[in-house]
Amino acid sequence: MKALLILFVLMNLDKLLKTGRCTETQDQILSITPKTQEQVDILKNVSTQYETALWQPVSPQYIKEETEVHLYVPANSSEIVKDLLQKHAITHGVLLANANELIEMQTRNGSTDPRSSSTFYERYHSLDDIYHWINRTQQENPNMVKTILIGSSYEKRPLYVLKLSINNRPNKKAMWIDCGIHAREWISPAFCLWFVQNSLSFYKLNQDITRILDNMDVYILPVMNPDGYHYTWTTNRMWRKNRSVSKSSNCIGVDLNRNFDANWCTEGASDEPCTEIYCGAFPESEPESQAVANFLRSHKDSVQFYLSIHSYSQMLLFPYSCTLDEAENHKDLLEMAQEAAQAIRRYYRNTYKYGSGAKTIYLAPGGSDDWAYNLGIKYSFTFELQDRGRYGFLLPPSLISRACNEALIAVKTIALKVIEKT
Ligand code: ARG
Ligand code: ZN
């Protein structure tokens, strides 16, 4: 008995020591709900003045009373941040106490971890791996998959679109899915891979997939922001924007989802390069947004359904985000989103909010969904996948399959509706 106790203490010595210390050894995600305007101002200050990354809301300007803030605090700023919170009587909870461990877990190469039994699609993949996957997928499915180079990123990485196409009947409809506009939202590229895999495996087996592919071509851009994505793997896991260098500032990166020509750079975006919601120098100033816009402009007669995949917060959003006005087919869009959310609830017992972007989250102009909608793609959506903040951007690999299957059923529901209506 004694020996067991000693063994236990020895095995956990590391942990016991850590909790005893006052300085953190791990990055943490704090949950903080400011109660007064003073606390709001302190929080805004903390998130801009110290080395932290705001997870929710996307920008300090949206911090308000009685609304939960998720803040990523690196170990080395932990003490000073917590002191400040305490000094102003701001209480906080710890959402994640072991962010570094989680990050390590997500970047661990599957082949070096024999205990991991998950498949390729239940892991996160580096950019190089994804490029290889694109190549392999096309070579293994020459009749169904083509790759199209639609442009390149600021750092000259290729932007490949996969085209899934079963037959070439005339006047075929099409849908578009892009993933990874925002670099740190890793579940998003994982979904694009999942979707392709699922489509190729279940064509002629699953009724819905078969009906969709028989009626539509599907264009998939697995990583719209490859420079940012690469950067999250090598340097800063919390990076959101692309990596373009600004002429007017030392700060790097444009928010690609503020860079499209839809009430560009009005309220909800910023012309300040150092913010996370920087709109860029002008609409489509960035090679990534320009490549997508050019491709969609030249395919607008066939593409009826536009979808952009983000995380986190579990929402199915549709236009507008750039104005509080209702889209002309608002009722249709609402009905489709509602049906998709119901399907998720029915099959997976999980809740997704739905509605127009501006009314469901915040005004956010210059987004790809609004731009595509104004181009004439009347069924335009942005999905925010799992979770609601438990892990946030650090969703563990073991939750990939659930998150993707939920999104998949929503995509299918809406795609089938689009086929019916067009
Ligand atoms: N979280 C996303 C963002 O901030 C929301 C996108 C909704 N659509 C939009 N056009 N803003 O970009
Ligand atoms: Zn996003």
Image (cartoon, grey):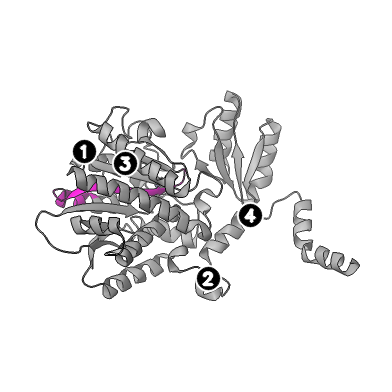
Q: Is residue 295 magenta?
A: yes
Q: In the image, what residue type sits under mark 1?
A: Asn
Name which residue lies at 29% across and 55% down. 208
Horizontal relation, residue 334 to residue 27: left or right: left
**Which amino acid type is shown beneath numbered disc 3?**
Gly
Residue at the spot of label 1:
374
Membership of 156 in magenta stretch? no
* Residue 183 visible in the snapshot: no
**Which is more N-terminal, label 3 or label 2?**
2
Q: Position of residue 321 (x, y in %)?
A: 33, 35
Residue 229 appears anywhere in the view: yes
Ligand 2 is within 8 Å of the C-beta of the residue at disc 2: no
Q: Which mark identifies residue 117? A: 2
Kindly report the distance in space between the C-alpha atoms of the residues bearing marks 4 and 3: 33 Å
- Work out whether mark 4 precedes mark 3 in sequence or the reverse, and give the earlier one: 4
Check mark 3 vs ligand 1: CB closer than 8 Å? yes or no.
yes
Upstream in sequence: badge 2 or badge 4? 4
Q: Is residue 61 left or right of residue 410?
A: right
Percent of width and height locating residue 171: 10, 53
The CA span between labels 2 and 4 is 23 Å
Examine the image and state in which quarter residue 143 appears.
bottom left
Marks 1 and 4 sit apart, C-alpha to C-alpha, by 43 Å
Residue that numbered label 4 is attached to: 98
Element type at mark 3 = loop
